[in-house]
Image: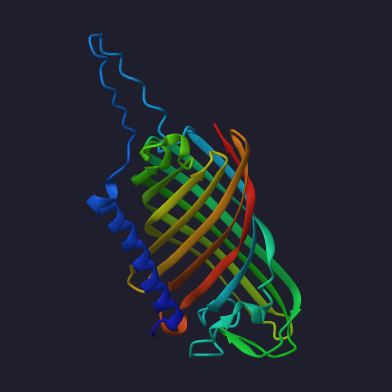
Amino acid sequence: MSRSAGGRTLRATALAAAGAGSFIAASPSARAEVAPLSLREPEVGGTPPAAEEPPPRRLDPAWRVQIQPSAWFVAPSGTLRMPISAGSGGGAFTTEGDAVAVERMNLDSTRLMPAGELHINSERWRFALSGAAFGIEREGTVADSSFRLGSVQVDAGDAMDVSFELTTVELSGGCRVWGYDFTAASEHPENAVDAACRVYALLGARFYDFSFDLTNRDGGASTGADQFFGEPIAGARVEFDIARDFSLTLQLTGGGFADSDRSSFSVDIVAGFEWRPFENVGVRIGYRQLAFDLADGDGPEEFEYDGRLAGLLAGVTIRF
């Protein structure tokens, strides 16, 4: 059975995002960095003065470890397809079920969920570990339209018990491939904007742990799935520091993996703004959208979740 059009689009976008990160890493012109330059003419008839120490480079962040606990105001979307042999409804059908939108099972409620990031910086290198989770349970929720999920037939007005959990974890390493210190590069540093920009090429891996259960109280049939997926990812991260108290970040990664009839593809974009009222403590707000296509099996026995998690992020930053 061919994958959904949304899944094919997502695969293409994921490969494009990953290719962009690889291009940045391989481009020789992207590796140039602007370093401060200090020259002084020796005094006539005197001893040349000692060389001046250059100012600290803004391109190398002063912090080494950064922790960012956050709350993600997020809602799921997309479509879910289940194998006909899953659960207790097997045997009644021999053809594949519907690709059911999560909102038809009343799972699209926006909720405040935990998320977090750990960053380790060493000059031009950085490493990160991040994770997020979403979970929702509906007991006795009423279907507003008819559908068949795997081998479970649900009619309009039927009461359902539904459980949905998704956890994502990401590991990545990055190398700074371009940087620009506005003050150091200026002929008149006293008049320059106190700002610095850094671009990192990223490589890593993303993992998904998905659990789902649905029971039709009226029909008595049930279906469910427990799936784990992993994929390599590549992308880029841009950081822009302003006046040492404010930062803007944008990170884009894409990934994918396919093995026989099992595959996963994704695109993840995170944008954020941070204000640091204290040197090592800040507050941040941003937005994240993670789009993915997770599939296992084929034909009537296929599991597929072509989904999205999207919403606002808010949290704190602690550096040391």
Mark yes or no: residue 250 visible. yes
Residue drawn at (41%, 27%), measured in percent from left and top?
55
Nearer to the camera, 157 or 106: 106
Total marks in image: 0
Quadrant showing the C terminus: top right
Quadrant of the rendered image containing residue 79: bottom right
In the displayed structure, would residue 25 be above or below residue 91? above
Residue 12 at x, y percent in the picture: 36, 73
Nearer to the camera, 78 or 196: 196
Residue drawn at (46%, 84%), measured in percent from left and top?
300
Nearer to the camera, 96 or 200: 200
Residue drawn at (29%, 52%), measured in percent from left and top?
25
> In this image, 9 relative to 220: left or right?
left
Residue drawn at (50%, 52%), measured in percent from left and top?
249
Q: Residue furthest front?
A: 44
Residue 184 at x, y percent in the picture: 38, 36
> In this image, 65 relative to 297: left or right?
right
Nearer to the camera, 13 or 2: 13
